[in-house]
């Protein structure tokens, strides 16, 4: 098997498996992550799948029916995380056939990620779970392992979320903030949001003034049309303005579709597909011409 970044509609099998179900666990699950470069332990704070975005590329199947919010049991999160970390430390995790096709160099724990079936910062238990994960990381002496928040940046201004961000920063952490568009119109098409585009930009700026931030951007073909060049230029302009105002953007992650979107997420008569490597490379080059101080990675 050749291990390389995925830039086509045929990703490596190990990158297509992002199930949030692992053995008997309710919240904690392992994945081999393209963007992490190895093993990421995810904590799903939204098993009820209630999200303030409806991204057309999201693989989570949402029925569209009314769902009762499900509180997170922090004690169960702690127990599941402890058990999974122990299996990583003693090596027993890799004995599971789920990981048979994972090369040795990818069998390294890179991060503990707050992610899952919806926006993790929307959970009332977000701060408590971040504190618990930080303590668990210390208990297992995993100083090099990152705490990563994968977020749509809609709720970063909440007081409890801002407090959690400071804990993440103090524990070798990163914020991976979604920005899939350069204009409000494309943002509405791609993310199907209930939060204004301007608020997302404001939140990224506020958080990025406090700590370094990574921008994660889905580059897909939607309805037969890839991320337009005009939209790319608006996107670059937005990032340039954020940086000029003190936002510490250190990396941009451009990634394309690796898993089939949930059918309920797709607008009528609209398909979502991966773009090819040359399209990703062109977008990357366009960014680098304008933002040469920022690392740009493609997946």
Image (spheres, rainbow, N blue to C red):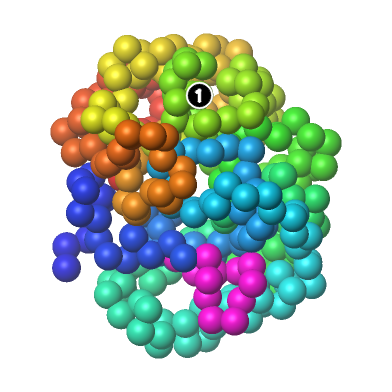
Instruction: Name the quadrant containing residue 259.
Output: bottom left
Image quadrant holding the N terminus, namely bottom left
Name the residue located 53 percent from the left edge and 71 percent from the top edge.
Answer: 21
- Region of the chain picked out in magenta, as a range: 20-31
**Secondary element at tag 1:** helix
Residue placed under numbered mark 1 in the picture: 188
Name the residue located 51 percent from the left edge and 16 percent from the top edge.
Answer: 184
Q: Count every numbered label the image shows and give the total.
A: 1
Please say whether residue 22 is one of the residues in the magenta stretch: yes
Can you give x and y, in whole percent of width and height, for residue 6 in the image?
A: 25, 50
Can you give x and y, in whole percent of width and height, for residue 198 in the image?
A: 62, 17
Q: Is residue 207 left or right of residue 152?
A: right
Can you give x and y, in whole percent of width and height, for residue 34 in the image?
A: 36, 54
Name the residue located 25 percent from the left edge and 61 percent from the top edge.
Answer: 12
Instruction: Name the quadrant containing residue 82.
Output: bottom right
Please say whether residue 148 is one of the residues in the magenta stretch: no
Can you give x and y, in whole percent of width and height, for residue 245 in the image?
A: 60, 13
Image quadrant holding the C terminus, namely top left
Q: Is residue 2 left or right of residue 191?
A: left
Instruction: Name the quadrant containing residue 162.
Output: top right
């Amino acid at each position: 098997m050749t291990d390389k970044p995925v830039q086509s509609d045929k990703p490596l099998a190990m990158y297509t498996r992002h199930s949030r179900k692992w053995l008997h666990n309710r919240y904690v699950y392992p994945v081999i992550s393209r963007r992490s470069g190895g093993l990421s332990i995810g904590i799903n704070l939204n098993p009820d799948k209630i999200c303030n975005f409806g991204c057309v590329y999201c693989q989570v199947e949402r029925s569209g029916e009314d769902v009762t919010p499900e509180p997170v049991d922090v004690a169960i999160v702690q127990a599941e995380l402890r058990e999974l970390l122990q299996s990583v430390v003693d090596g027993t995790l890799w004995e599971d056939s789920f990981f048979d096709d994972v090369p040795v160099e990818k069998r390294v724990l890179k991060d503990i990620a707050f992610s899952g079936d919806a926006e993790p910062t929307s959970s009332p238990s977000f701060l408590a779970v971040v504190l618990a994960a930080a303590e668990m990381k210390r208990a297992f002496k995993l100083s090099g392992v990152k705490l990563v928040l994968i977020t749509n940046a809609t709720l970063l201004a909440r007081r409890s979320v801002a407090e959690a961000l400071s804990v993440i920063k103090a524990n070798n952490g990163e914020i991976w903030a979604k920005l899939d568009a350069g204009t409000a119109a494309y943002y509405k098409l791609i993310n199907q949001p209930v939060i204004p585009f301007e608020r997302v930009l404001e939140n990224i700026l506020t958080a990025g003034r406090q700590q370094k931030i990574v921008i994660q951007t889905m580059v897909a073909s939607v309805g037969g049309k890839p991320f337009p060049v005009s939209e790319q230029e608006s996107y670059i302009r937005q990032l340039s303005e954020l940086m000029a105002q003190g936002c510490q953007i250190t990396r941009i992650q451009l990634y394309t579709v690796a898993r089939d979107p949930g059918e309920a997420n797709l607008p009528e008569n609209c398909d979502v597909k991966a773009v090819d490597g040359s399209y990703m490379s062109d977008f990357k080059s366009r960014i680098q011409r304008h933002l040469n101080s920022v690392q740009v990675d493609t997946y």
